[in-house]
Amino acid sequence: MHIGILTLALSLPGCGSLKEKRQRMGGLHERFGRNPAVAVCESADHDRLDASEWTFVVAAMSSQRVESLCSEIEDKLQRTVDGRVVGVAREFL
């Protein structure tokens, strides 16, 4: 079993309320949490309006599959979230 931890820091310029922040993040739990190989949570910046940090834990039988899933998550997040990715950290166990 191989495990990857992907952490993405996002900037949300112009975000004026926590409600708007939730709307802009657009249900990351529902989108990525459907995959049984992925666990997702907002890991920092809970009360900040202009920033958000999300961590994804990916488990698979091969390291290539873990890396592929991490890349898919990162690409999809950059395309669908109304904000800018300002930091990416990957750790493989």
Image (spheres, rainbow, N blue to C red):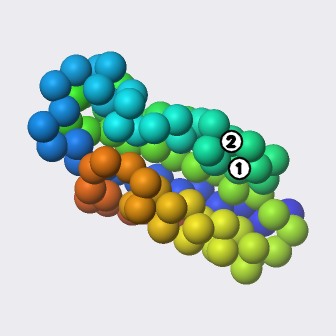
Q: Nearer the viewer, mark 2 or mark 1?
A: 2
In this picture, residue 11 sits left or right of residue 73: left
Q: Residues within 10 Å of mark 2 (few under 14, many from 20)?
A: some
Callout 1: few (<14), some (14-19), or many (20+) C-alpha neighbours within 10 Å? many
Question: Dot 1 lies on which element?
Answer: strand
Q: Which quadrant would the N terminus be assigned to in this image? A: bottom right
Q: Earlier in the sequence, mark 2 or mark 1?
A: 2
Residue at left 28%, top 50%? 83
Q: Quadrant of the C terminus?
A: bottom right
Could you tell me residue 47's position as x and y percent?
29, 21
Quarter of the image for residue 21 reads: top left
Is residue 16 placed above or below 73 in the rendered structure? above
Residue tagged by mark 2?
A: 33
Question: In the rendered view, does 46 fall on the left or right side of 39?
Answer: left
Q: Identity of the amino acid at label 2?
A: Gly
Q: Secondary structure at mark 2?
A: helix
Q: Nearer the viewer, residue 28 or 42?
A: 28
Q: CA distance from mark 2 to mark 1?
A: 6 Å
Q: Nearer the viewer, residue 35 or 61?
A: 35
Extreme bottom residue here? Answer: 64
Number of marks in the rendered image: 2
Residue under the point 66% across and 74% down: 68
Which residue is under mark 1? 38
Q: Can residue 18 be spotted in the picture?
A: yes
Q: Amino acid at mark 1?
A: Val
79 relative to 85 in the view: left or right: right
Tell me whether circle 2 and circle 1 mark residues in contact (CB < 8 Å).
Answer: yes
- Residue drawn at x 31%, y 58% as measured from the top left: 85
Residue depicted at 52% across the width and 46% down the height: 55
